[in-house]
Image: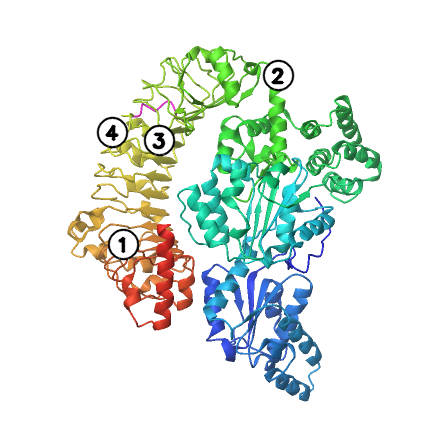
Amino acid sequence: MGTENASSSSCFPSSSIVPGWRYEYHVFLSFRGSDTRKKFTSHLYVALKRNGITTFRDDESLERGEFISPELMRAIEESRFAVVVFSKNYASSSWCLTELAKIVECMDKKKLTVLPVFYDVDPSDVRKLRGTFAEAFAKHLKDNNENVQTWKDVVTKVAGISGWDLRDESESSVIEKIIQRISLELDHKFSFVFKHLVGMDSRVKEMLDLCTCEGLDCAHFVGICGMGGIGKTTLAREIYDRIYSGFEACSFLENVREDTESKGLVSLQKILLSKIFIGTEINIHDLYEGINVIGTRLHNKKVLIVLDDVNEEEQLEALAGNGGWFGPGSIIIVTSRDRHLLRRHGVKHIYEAKELNKDEALKLFSWKAFKKPYPEQNYADLSMEFVRYANGLPLALKVLGSSLFGRTLDAWRGARDKLAANPNTGILKILQISLVGLEDAQRELFLDIACFFKGGHISYVRDTLESLGHYPDYDIYVLMDKSLITIESNGTLWMHDLLQEMGQDNVRCESPKEPGKRSRLWCYKDVLHVLKNNTGTEFVEGIVLKMLTDKNEPLSAEVFSKMKNLRFLKNCCEEPLQGFNRGHVQLPKGLSYISNELRIIDWHGYPLISMPTNFQPIKLVELRMHCSGIKKLWKGILILNELKLIDLSVSQKLIEIPDLSGALNLEKLILKCCTRLCKIHASVGDLKKLIHLDLNGCKNLSSLPNAICSLMSLKTLNLSDCSRLVKLPKNLGNLEGLEELDVSGTAIRELFSSSNLLKKLKKLSIGGCDFLLSKKLLNFPLLQRSPDPMGMLMRTLSSLSSLTDLNLSYCNLQTVPDAIGCCLSCLNHLNLRGNKFDCLPKNIIRLSNLETLFLSDCKDLRLLPELPSNIKYFEAEGCTSLETLPFTPEDVFSPHLFLINCVKLIENQSFGDMFSTILARYIQVSLSLSLS
């Protein structure tokens, strides 16, 4: 969709940044070094960097000439924010003033946002050029500097911007607010979905009038109502984009209706609060606790909240009960298809979303069909015909235009004639034209997503679709180009509700009266009808069973006998509703009659002890049977050349896995929490393509076959919590491709006899293994017969040159090896929880890539050295002996610093009364949050 920028209401400052602009730095710091370099500016720079905000700070050691350097000019141009620290001597520096002139030039071009800070000066003195600023400019005039008037103008202009006066607030408070302001904008991503918006100015103005019609002394609820596809979400997002910077905190919750069904209201309450209190973990255990937390924590905050696609009053009651929940000036925008719902909740001001007028509709259609705001000459009349069909519905215009882009006049006429032959003003019929031009495989992919996979994460769905015979790496992007699906910023595969309904309607139309003659079955009633009445046919290709019944349904396996082309079978075991039992399909003869065309079996709670002997799924690619009753998957050898995945997680009756030599293309074998599994068949060594072996929680497994050592393709081996596992195969170290190894919680007394493995390991976890206890250290094979076991451990760690993640938690370490700081230069995450050392080696500061450090429950820890500057998450909960911290008072406000129950830090007065007060307050808040 296409846009003309509208000026926002004076009540709500809008973002000044141009979407799509390339920024090298998040922040440019402009300041007078002699005034603030070792004070406020230094503290601000450290806090910005610690919060992941890339900051350019002009270094006084740079060679300075008469003119500001091109590099410095470029740094200003490539920054998104400029923080200007006005101090008493700021104007005495021609360098600072030239810098400021460049900053204002970029600000005027809307490439940069300026945030002024007044350090030990009166803002009105700066704005009116009094005091030291008057003296500085008098000297510049005396020196005949030709830029004086320009400099005066830019100082006056920047000083007139709302900023922070350090005479009124503490440095730590101002720094926190600056970081919140910048983080809010950086976290607010400009979505290309809303590129080419049209007709927004008048709609935005009407909405802003509704938002402010009763003044700003209370919280306002405003509704946006209208039919699906009319543009409610688009308008709400545009309002949000334009005014969000005028609020203390903001939260946009999309898809409330669908997320309520899939995640629950408590999850949505947590998401809302996490966006308001960025970086703070909010613990909510039930709906009513969430209501209390929202109403209590937000009643003094000026917030902007958007609740998109609400369809139940319970959702509003849980997320935005009434105006008393929020501070004065807050705005709560609710979009819904149900106007009466908004009225029932007391929303007085409701904006009825309007269809686009003819000119707006033609412009939107043209952007999609021609990539410009008007149609090509030969297509003008045809374009107007499609615009009339769409009747001003933005989604229909977008999809129609995208489907016709780049096509010939004959193709356009054919598409028009198809619409004319089926004169239906309904949305689904309008959207149906979007499938014209798709290849058969692309159309089938679209239908599979509409019926089965909408809302899944792309990384999971992609593999599943490939297993079903699709070509997702290409065809998914074809569907995206045609505006049929989207991939959200969090990786969710998505499509508009109307497009999903259109796809599902296509499948229903295959057999309007008999579901058993349709290609896909996903609706509970339809599936139950087909299975109970045995009406399935060869047309059925996919079934998803979500069985919630008042009793388990005993069905004959023969119900599948006619479904000879079934390729996808998923039996979900949903959480039971109140008054219902957890149900599953009871098939006494199991899968005897299931099609050999099956590519995916995903059967939660499969009840039988093994697969039938006559079952030969030669095309099977994925076999998932979580929580099954399987004891042994099958007898003998099954030839399964297509099989890539076996996942039998939490199958607690499983004793052993079968001979897998007939599944030589297997890539993933997942047996998590199969607590009775006691044997891994030696044929696993034949699986030359195996990359992932997960035996986490197999508590009865006491050994591994030596054949595992031949799996040169293996990248991940998870043996965590295999509590009876005493040793690893001798030649495990020969697995040179291994990148992740987890042996935490095992009983092993040795690791590897070869160091080849260690050179390529990226993640190593030996948490909870006590073989590093000093008395048992000699059992570590690389340390045997060594007079200096700790030294040998250091040499072992020194071979981990590629390690990014190291877990040595609860290993009874009494000393942290210096090798960690000396040799593990790639380390990102270090977990040392629950050990017995009293200090860390000073060389830990050399870990320049370290982002997270876990030290909780290290009760003997007293001292901490200086830590790497880029640590984003530091945890020392329950370190009761900890006396010192390598942090400044401002750091205590970091949302990634957790110091609960560090009582000696409060008792220790070496930090000064102010620091102790701040720390005590933070610990009290953290403790209350954890209890809530």
SS type, badge 2: loop
Graded by Cα atoms within 10 Å as few (under 14), some (14 to 19) or many (20 or more), the crowding at tag 1 reads many
Q: Is residue 46 visible?
A: yes
The stretch in magenta equals 656-663
In the displayed structure, does residue 71 sit left or right of residue 662? right
Which residue type carries mark 1?
Asp
Q: Position of residue 695 (x, y in %)?
A: 31, 35
Q: Are marks 1 and 2 in contact (CB under 8 Å)?
A: no
Please give the name of the residue rendered at 47% of the width and 38% of the height, measured from the top-left corner. 264
Q: CA distance from mark 3 to mark 2?
A: 39 Å
Pointer 2: what residue?
512
Q: Position of residue 306 (x, y in %)?
A: 58, 47
Pointer 4: what residue?
678
Q: Earlier in the sequence, mark 2 or mark 4?
A: 2
* Vertical arrangement, residue 616 with respect to residue 330, above or below: above
In the displayed structure, does residue 560 sit left or right of residue 243? left
Q: Position of residue 277 (x, y in %)?
A: 47, 54
Pointer 1: what residue?
857
Q: Nearer the viewer, mark 3 or mark 1?
A: 1
Pointer 3: what residue?
649
Rendered image coloring scheme? rainbow
Graded by Cα atoms within 10 Å as few (under 14), some (14 to 19) or many (20 or more), the crowding at tag 4 reads some
Magenta span contains residue 42: no
* Vertical arrangement, residue 284 with respect to residue 25, above or below: above
